[in-house]
Image (spheres, rainbow, N blue to C red):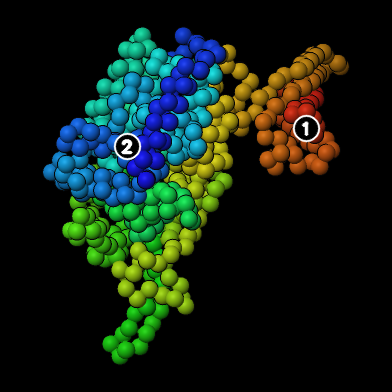
Amino acid sequence: MAILLEEIVESIEVWLSQLRKLRSKQPYVDPNLDPVLLVPGVAGSVLMAVDENGRSERVWVRIFGADHKLRTKLWSRFDTSIGKTVSLDPKTSIMVPEDRFGLYAIDMLDPDMIIGRDCVYYFHDMIIEMINWGFQEGTTLFGFGYDFRQSNRFEETLKRLAEKLESVYTASGGKRINIISHSMGGLLIFEKYVKNWIAVAAPFRGAPGYVTSTFLNGMSFVEGWEQNFFISKWSMHQLLIECPSLYELMGCPNFQWEHSPALEIWREKHDSEGSCNVMLESYPPTDTISVFSEALSSNTVNYHGESIPLPFNLEILKWANETRRIMSRAKVPPTVKFYNIYGTSVETPHSVCYGSKDAPVSDLEQLPFVKATYICVDGDGTVPTESAKADGLDAEARVGMPGEHRGILCDQHLFRILKHWLKVGDPDPFYNPLNDYVILPTAFEIERHREKGCEVTSLKEEWEIISREQNDGNFMNMHDGKPLVSSIIVAQGGEKECKRGKAHATVTVHPPHEGKQHVELNAVSVTLDG
């Protein structure tokens, strides 16, 4: 029955895809726009399993039989000789669907769960927004999908990315490309083809709390009973334990963290006399490897009746350490402008603790079955703000915005920033992406005159500040409906031959009205001749 339902769903998706193309009317196409390539992060690309007869089926992402397909088709082992994660099924190879454009999600039920036959699937809202701006699929808007199990420096992926950039460059008539990458996507740039790189929620120094709990307990995309219809936390754990991309997300041990992430364990130990002691052990990033190794020493999967050991993989760790070394030395080419958008205001796991004083852990092999508690820091729920900000690159701008790791991609605030940086339409010269305000001058008056040996200059300015988030508790809304008045006095002294002067300014901020904030500046300066 599940197979029949799956075939029905796939047929409906194809039908909806064709129906969308027939019904969709591009309201406006701007032929002058520079091309954009969307690059997703881990788990953001569609994956197909191809058998020895050339028959293919989607194994990521899907609803019916998702957990079964993951265990039979995607479970893998890392081959150190080629630096590649290879499926346990020797008759199956994993590939990204070959699609001309590489994008467009179909939100038949849920845009994060149901997709079309294309290779990136969670940029749905952004794609719709950009099409409304005048971008066109296959001409100025493209996507790049890849096997997210592999390392970020996997040679086959980099080769495909180079080929994709060249094809986009050609399709757009030789225009250099704007890359918008999410999370771990698109960390290597090809100077010849790229104009701007906009990184969104990128874990430049890792996601320590997220990765620690994933190594020991797995990762779930949905919670509660809904897991029965998608992928179990444990099945995902057994996939990721052999994926270099996860090891490369570990917290950077050489980074100067404001508060160093730690793995904490309440341990129960017995001395030689049989006495029991409970103590809290804390492991910094450099010392967690021994814990992971012991905790996962007996980890196995049953694959077609065969028990296959899947311990913490020290060979993958060596590979990941080399990746971090390469990335730490990488620089953005001088002809490429780099922008960093990072998430804030969401509690994000940083340090992870197992056990408690009353319920300590006696054996580290119990850790995969113990619920973790977290010490959180500011971030996007996955990547700490501190890590996402620390790109170590020469950035044109770094902008923090409240939002969840993947939810940021649907945020109108993000869309306004992208539209501004991509120079879509007529850029607003008064818009400031750093605070998402538009400041419009409405009045300007300046007068100068001399009076009894004094030079008097008076200035009066007025602005309207327009913000989409007037009620976010910022400084403009702290005056309880009454005008906020501030004064500044500046005096300048000097020798007899020098001028002396004094300036006085008053700034009045009026309460918001109809989405606008009115600000007045009145200033007078008096300069005395020496």
Is residue 85 or residue 193 the one in the foreground? Answer: 85
User: Which structural element holds mark 2?
Assistant: strand
Is residue 44 or residue 203 the one in the foreground? Answer: 44
**x and y, in percent, of residue 366 in the image:** 34, 69
Q: Is residue 505 above or below residue 79?
A: above
Which residue is rendered at x = 78% and y = 28% of the image?
514
Q: Is residue 462 above or below residue 211?
A: above
**Residue sticking out furthest to the left:** 81
**Residue sticking out furthest to the right:** 452
Q: Is residue 368 left or right of residue 496?
A: left
Callout count:
2
Q: Which mark is residue 58?
A: 2
Tell me which label, 2 or 1, sits earlier in the chain.
2
- Mark 2, mark 1: which one is toward the viewer? 2
Is residue 432 or residue 422 the one in the foreground? Answer: 422
**Residue sticking out furthest to the bottom:** 273
Give the quadrant of the C terminus: top right
Give the quadrant of the N terminus: top left
**x and y, in percent, of residue 214 in the image:** 37, 54
Distance from Cα at disc 2 to Cα at disc 1:
51 Å
**x and y, in percent, of residue 327 in the image:** 31, 38
The residue under label 2 is which amino acid type? Arg
Which residue is rendered at x = 51% and y = 22% of the image?
130
